[in-house]
Amino acid sequence: MTAVVAEHDDHHDHHDHGPEKGVLRWIFTTNHKDIGTLYLVFGLIMFFVGGAMALVIRSELFEPGLQFVDPNFFNSMTTMHALVMVFGAVMPAFVGLANWMIPMMIGAPDMALPRMNNMSFWMLVAGVLLLASTLFMEGGAPSGGWTFYPPLVFQNGKSFPFAIFSVHLLGISSIMGAINVIATIFNMRAPGMTLMKMPLFVWTWLITAFLLIAIMPVFAGAVTMLLTDKFFDTSFFDAAGGGDPVLYQHIFWFFGHPEVYVMILPTFGVASTIIPVFARKPLFGYASMVYATGAIAFLSFIVWAHHMFTVGMPVAGELYFMYATMLIAIPTGVKVFNWTATMWKGSMTFETPMLFSIAFVVLFTMGGFTGLMMSVAPVDFQYHDTYFIVAHFHYTLVPASIFILMAAGYFWLPKWTGNMYNEKIGRLHFWLSAVSVNILFFPQHFLGLAGMPRRIPDYAIQFADWNMVSSIGAFIYGFSQLLFVYIVIDTIRGGTGEKVSDEVWEDASKHSLEWTVPSPAPYHTFSTPPARIPTEHF
Amino acid sequence: MSEDIGQKNTKLVRKLALVAIAMFGFGYALVPLYDVLCDLTGLNGKVEGQAVQEVAYQVDNSREVTVEFLTSLNESTPMLFRSEVKSMKVHPGEYYTVNFYAKNTTNMPMIAQAIPSITPGLAAEFFKKTQCFCFTEQTFAANEEKTMPVRFVVEPTLPERYKTVTLAYTFFDNTNISKK
Ligand code: HEM
Ligand SMILES: [Cu+2]
């Protein structure tokens, strides 16, 4: 009895026990689990907003000719779809996972900087709302592409400065989030949790956070230069004043290439966490996974001009960026090899998270291969700015990052809610997604090779058939994602009714600490450090 | 959370925030870096913005280089702009003059700036101009038409592999910016 009272007092200094009641809980919360939930829900909503925009695009492209939207709005849709998906859906969703899982995986009571955590979330919301508001402005939302290339970007109407300020807000939010992740991992690890014992998800996020701190400010600088070029007569990118528009492309892609890795490294981390659990084997090559992640991050800074093979670089530049880009395939190959080797002779079972993860390994590799094709400078002259590249990056983002985010949802929902999701509907969701995503994106390879340019609302009739197939795939894919929403809500409400164990998945607690706390995870975990550090994962 | 961790966090946050600010600066530093790199290597085909002294070269009559002239207008510049000839064959080391015509098609005075560029970029350093309308802004009266000579030489040191050099000009309407 006395012991209980003593413990009670202990906690009282800094926290009360459960969450506050009502909406205020969500507005003022500094709890890593609450903030993680906020990020995840926000990301999911934005996934559907961005998805709706994609369906506008695919509706217009269903047949040749202009049928539903005017070309300027069409271009706004491609631009906004990309911005919403990158900055509103994928990145926030991974920050949400980081918030939920990193403290639990390293045995920490919370994130290192809980108040900053709250602030970065609400700044993200402000940034995305500002961006969304441009849809209703004179001249429409930004329509010059998510890359904001000058001088095209200056043709945007009133929305131009708002889009830039929104990028500033999103940038500050990501930088704060990244600082928080680094501080948490460096200062809050439980005793015994050495760096090389951390689960790979934590490792990949640590490296991602460093990438973010290095690149988001550069992007903020680049768009600020656009802003002053337009309104304050500077000439960073204005040839008439001695500037050079190609310079913008260099600065942008110095940010832009690492940015694509910001979306894929945490994906690698989650895959490396899920696959061993369902293969019932330790992860193959833990250390090589860590080093490969580091190598990919390092290389991502020195390959940016592979996005610019056609701007008129001299041969020496083309060759350098070609070979440097090809190098990325090596650490990426190491990873694919390790995932495959982890499954090799494992006692595999195929629950929904594992299905999504296996599909990720296969389909991401396809995206990697088309990347390798485009890294060959002379042939990229054919692929550049066609649907081939659209196919490339959608293979690396949708059946990779998005599939893994879904896998993460299924994998950890039982831990978060204490309830089991409906496996049957989960598998239905998987199969619909896996089939339709290929109907959606595979034909785009053919379209690109045949010469269909990206970002056009109308096209020559020889492209009609594959566009129709692609659009049909898009609608099946889009609507089948509603199953996920249904499952999430259903699971929160009780799911199958089966109470899940602390471990949820067989022997999961050997792999990582979050499976040692009760399900659902209590509001505060690891107020006292864990007694034992799992070592199965390396 | 103990005091100790609080202090460690503050220190780390300061350092990381400094890195972020430094990277913001680095974005801006890329601008002069890019210019210096392009100046040194001539990678982007930018040509000197100033006239060079006319010096006599040993004319290389053994080979001919084709020099092409391209004229274009920035998006909404209200002008007519063309060159006297589309291309000419030149001997390295010899000076040539070619005329360009530009007309202000508005009823208002206009200040315009022409920006030259050379392709292939690495040939730019061998292409010298002693006279060009691109060295300064040009003022046009309403509807004025001008004939503007360009005097240039292709240096004999131009590597053999360059058979064709293209000189492109784009005229920008700077009236609004220059008036301020
Ligand atoms: C083996 C690894 C990869 C290689 C060699 C590679 C190579 C390339 C190349 C050469 C391009 C430029 C194509 C062009 O514009 O003509 C490109 C574009 C792109 N890649 Fe990759 N890539 C790889 C992996 C990834 C990953 C993992 C992602 C994202 C998660 C990604 C996302 C993108 C995006 C978004 C673009 C297009 C950007 C735009 O123009 O809007 N790539 N890639
Ligand atoms: Cu790239």
Image: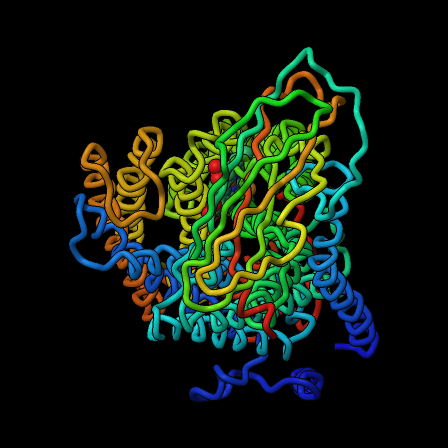
Splitting the image into four quadrants, where does ligand 2 fall? top right
- In the image, residue B132 lies at what x, y percent? 65, 45
The quarter of the picture where residue A311 lies is: top right
Out of A212 and B131, give the one closest to the viewer: B131
Q: Which residue: 60% across, 72% down? A: A232
Image quadrant holding the N terminus of chain A, namely bottom right
Q: Which residue: 51% across, 60% down? A: B173
The quarter of the picture where residue A187 lies is: bottom right
Q: Which residue: 47% across, 62% down? A: A154
Out of A487 and A69, give the one closest to the viewer: A69
Name above or below for residue A289 compared with residue B159: below
Observer able to see residue B128: yes
- In the image, residue A320 lies at what x, y percent? 66, 30
Q: Which coloring applies here?
A: rainbow
Q: Which residue: 56% across, 32% down? A: B166
Left or right: A484, with A189 as reference point = left
- In the image, residue B34 lies at what x, y percent? 71, 48
Out of A292 and A271, give the one closest to the viewer: A292
Name above or below for residue A271 compared with residue A528: above
Image quadrant holding the C terminus of chain A, namely top right
